[in-house]
Image (cartoon, rainbow, N blue to C red):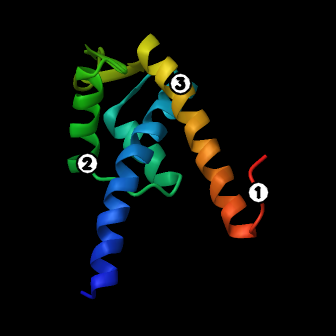
Amino acid sequence: MSAAEELYEKWKSQFRKGFLELCVLELLSKSGRSYGLAIMEQLNNAGVDVTEGTLYPLLMRMTKDESIEAQWETPDVGHPRKYYVISRTGSALLGQMREEYERSAAARRTIMTGGHAE
């Protein structure tokens, strides 16, 4: 692997961590609640490749950070599932993350076009 490829992989890993958290909050904000496998499927369907080994530790950390809440439910048929919902803290965080994401994207567009920030 070349030096550029190694640097890219490192950058991509860091970028994806924050982006993935933003995407999970967006999904839970939209759906109201969901369980891990459904979240993973929605992310993968949207083009955000994620595995169980990445998603479940993130969900545990977000639960610990209190940006999401988790509750086990046992249906009449099937196995118990842990459902996740966005918390008040998570909703406030999501608003801030959206603003920063848009601000960063606008700055990048300005840089790319050689323009000036408004």
* Residue 64 image offset from top left, x and y in percent: 22, 21
Q: Which residue is under mark 1? A: 116
Kindly tell me whether residue 41 is visible in this rendering.
yes
Q: Earlier in the sequence, mark 3 or mark 1?
A: 3
Three-letter code for the amino acid on which mark 1 is drawn: His
Give the side of residue 87 with respect to residue 72, left or right: right
Image-quadrant location for residue 61? top left
Identified at 40% across, 38% down, the residue is 21
**Mark-to-mark CA distance, 1 and 2:** 38 Å
Q: Amino acid at mark 3?
A: Ser
Label 3 and label 1: CA atoms lie apart by: 34 Å
Check if mark 3's residue and mark 1's residue have beta carbons within 8 Å: no
Mark seen at residue 54: 2
Residues packed near mark 1 inside 10 Å, few (<14), some (14 to 19) or many (20 plus): few
Label 3 sits on a secondary structure element that is helix
Q: Secondary structure at mark 2?
A: helix
Q: How busy is the neighbourhood of tag 3: few (under 14 within 10 Å), some, or many (20 plus)?
A: some
The mark that comes first in sequence, 2 or 3, is 3
What's the CA distance linking mark 2 and mark 3? 20 Å
Q: Which residue in the protein does label 3 denote?
A: 29
Residue 90 relative to residue 2: left or right: right
Q: Residue at x 40, y 58 (%)?
A: 49
Q: Position of residue 45 (x, y in %)?
A: 50, 53
In the figure, is residue 79 to the left or right of 96?
left
Dot 2: few (<14), some (14–19), or many (≥20) neighbours within 10 Å? Answer: few
Residue that protrudes farthest toward the top in the picture? 88
Q: Which mark is residue 97?
A: none
Up the image or down, 10 lies above or below 65; here it is below
Residue at (27, 22) in percent of width and height: 65
